[in-house]
Each structure stands twice: as structure tokens, then as C-alpha cells.
């Protein structure tokens, strides 16, 4: 799991260093406590960002589900923190999250005078890239297809796109984590969520099937009902463009990113 505060530099440039330290410490403490409470291990802080992992150093049962629960809980904690910051006259710290699951090398890495327990491997880099892609889609909780496949019966996801992130070569399905489907769950779907994402799924299927005119109709309907959805605005714009300038022959719906 990677987290990052949106526009942190801009948010804090007018704050005195002591206030930045105090508010960032409060924020990191809350995020860490929530991650630990859902079976995770905070690997490191990178400025305002957090890297966390599950299933190490101790093996954990159902660790992908625990990580998804942690993401939903961290989002809720972030909202509560932001409300408190606003009451005190400070800017909020809205947070984006990226999650992937796979095999990594975990252990002590470093030099003879400085060691650090961490995880290494392509899957770690991919999780970081996924977090950054929230900026492109206007999302907050992005996960890979590997996460969705592992826990699709326990959570509500919406497909976002198949991508090749910057620095990668293999296409990766992206999903937005929406809610916990367990009966009585704290982060259960809200009123209308199921209907909303059924409508989204219809538009997404039309887009992937290159039925551009009908995709435009459905995404327009979606945005009329749910204005400001960044992913819908992006795919609607592409569908409109592709009606007059279709993608190349053999297009498979994959978006390749040339920069972070």
C-alpha cells in the first residue's frame, strides 16, 4: 500500500514549519494506527507518504481483505482529520491510496552502518505507480486487478481502465475500491451505490467494446446523475474523440502512460 497527500507542497507552503510538523505528525499517527489496526505493517514514511505491507513480517490470513479494509478505514480517518484541521483554520490533507498484491522480497536491506526492513520487487514499484494514477482518474482508492480478483466477493469495485504504468511493460487492470460488501459492514455501499456502478459498468463495457456512440450516451447519462466524476469525464472525452478519430487497428483498450 502506498498513500500520498494531494498537493502537499502547495497546501503547506504558507504554514510555518512548526505547524507542518505538528499536523503531519498527527496525520501520520492516525494513518499508522489505522493500518496497524487492520493487520498491516508500516514500512516507512517518505515525507508525507506512507508505505505499508501485509503478510510480513508475520504471515496473515486473508491479508488482501485486511489491506482493503485498511484503505477504507484510512479514508474515513482522513475525512475526520480534515474536518478537525478545517475547524482549526488549517487546510485539509486529502489522501490518495494505491494497492497491489504479489510476491516481493522482504527483509533487511542496506549498508554495514544502516539497515532497513523493507519490501523490494516489481510489485512494490507497481503499487507506487497505481497510487500516482489516482491523479489521472480523479479517484482516491485504486487497486490492481490482482487485488480485485483476490477479494471480489467481499468488496464493491468499479473497473477504471487497463493500463501500462510508466516504467512497466505488462498491462494492469485498474479498479476503484468503493465499499465493503459484508453484511453490516462499517463501510458498506451507500444508498444508490450499486445502481451507480451498474450504470458505470454498462458505459465501461461499451467503451471497451468500441461502441463509441452508445458509450457517449451512457457516460453522459452517468455524469448527469453523478457530476464531477473524473474517470467518467476522461472516458467520455475519449469516446467523443474516438468517434471521429478511432484508435489504431488492434486497439485492446489499454492505456499506456509515458510519464508518472
Image (cartoon, rainbow, N blue to C red):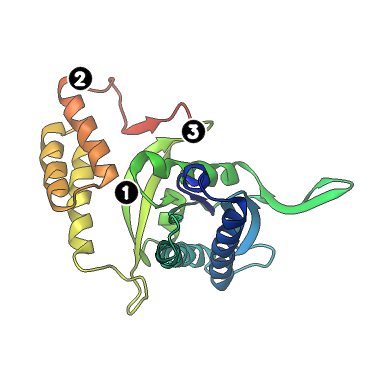
Check if mark 1's residue and mark 3's residue have beta carbons within 8 Å.
no
Density class for disc 2 (Cα within 10 Å; few <14, some 14-19, many ≥20) is: few
Return the residue at label 3: 260
Please name whichever residue, 145 or 81, is drawn nearer the observer in this view of the structure. Answer: 81
The x and y percentages for residue 56 are: 66, 62
Q: Is residue 60 visible?
A: yes
Q: Secondary structure at mark 2?
A: loop
Residue 48 horizontal side relative to residue 202, left or right: right
Quadrant of the image occupied by residue 149: bottom left
Return the residue at label 1: 159
Residue 103 horizontal side relative to residue 100, left or right: right
Rendered residue at 31%/33% (across/down) = 253
Distance between the Cα atoms at labels 1 and 3?
A: 21 Å
Density class for disc 3 (Cα within 10 Å; few <14, some 14-19, many ≥20) is: few
Q: Nearer the viewer, mark 1 or mark 3?
A: 3
Q: Earlier in the sequence, mark 2 or mark 3?
A: 2
Q: Secondary structure at mark 3?
A: loop
The x and y percentages for residue 128 are: 54, 44
Distance between the Cα atoms at labels 2 and 3?
A: 26 Å
Amino acid at each position: 500500500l502506498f498513500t500520498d497527500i494531494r498537493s502537499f507542497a502547495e497546501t503547506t507552503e504558507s504554514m510555518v514549519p512548526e505547524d507542518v510538523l505538528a499536523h503531519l505528525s498527527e496525520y501520520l499517527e492516525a494513518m499508522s494506527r489505522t493500518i496497524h489496526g487492520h493487520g498491516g505493517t508500516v514500512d516507512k514514511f517518505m515525507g508525507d507518504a506512507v508505505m505499508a505491507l501485509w503478510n510480513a513480517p508475520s504471515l496473515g490470513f486473508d491479508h488482501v481483505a485486511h489491506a482493503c479494509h485498511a484503505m477504507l478505514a484510512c479514508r474515513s480517518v482522513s475525512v475526520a482529520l480534515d474536518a478537525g484541521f478545517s475547524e482549526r483554520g488549517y487546510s485539509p490533507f486529502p489522501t490518495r491510496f494505491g494497492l497491489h498484491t504479489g510476491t516481493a522480497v522482504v527483509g533487511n536491506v542496506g549498508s554495514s552502518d544502516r539497515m532497513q526492513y523493507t519490501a523490494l520487487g516489481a510489485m512494490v514499484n507497481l503499487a507506487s505507480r497505481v497510487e500516482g494514477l489516482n491523479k489521472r482518474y480523479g479517484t482516491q482508492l485504486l487497486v490492481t486487478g490482482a487485488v480485485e480478483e483476490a477479494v471480489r466477493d467481499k468488496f464493491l469495485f468499479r473497473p477504471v481502465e487497463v493500463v501500462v504504468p510508466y516504467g512497466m511493460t505488462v498491462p494492469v487492470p485498474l479498479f476503484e475500491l468503493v465499499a465493503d460488501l459484508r453484511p453490516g459492514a462499517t463501510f458498506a455501499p451507500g444508498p444508490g451505490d450499486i445502481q451507480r456502478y451498474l450504470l458505470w459498468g454498462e458505459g465501461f463495457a461499451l467503451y471497451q467494446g468500441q461502441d463509441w456512440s452508445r458509450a457517449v450516451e451512457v457516460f453522459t447519462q452517468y455524469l448527469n446523475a453523478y457530476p464531477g466524476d473524473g474517470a467518467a469525464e476522461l472516458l467520455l472525452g475519449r469516446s467523443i474523440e474516438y468517434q471521429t478519430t478511432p484508435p489504431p487497428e488492434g486497439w485492446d483498450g489499454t492505456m499506456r502512460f509515458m510519464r508518472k
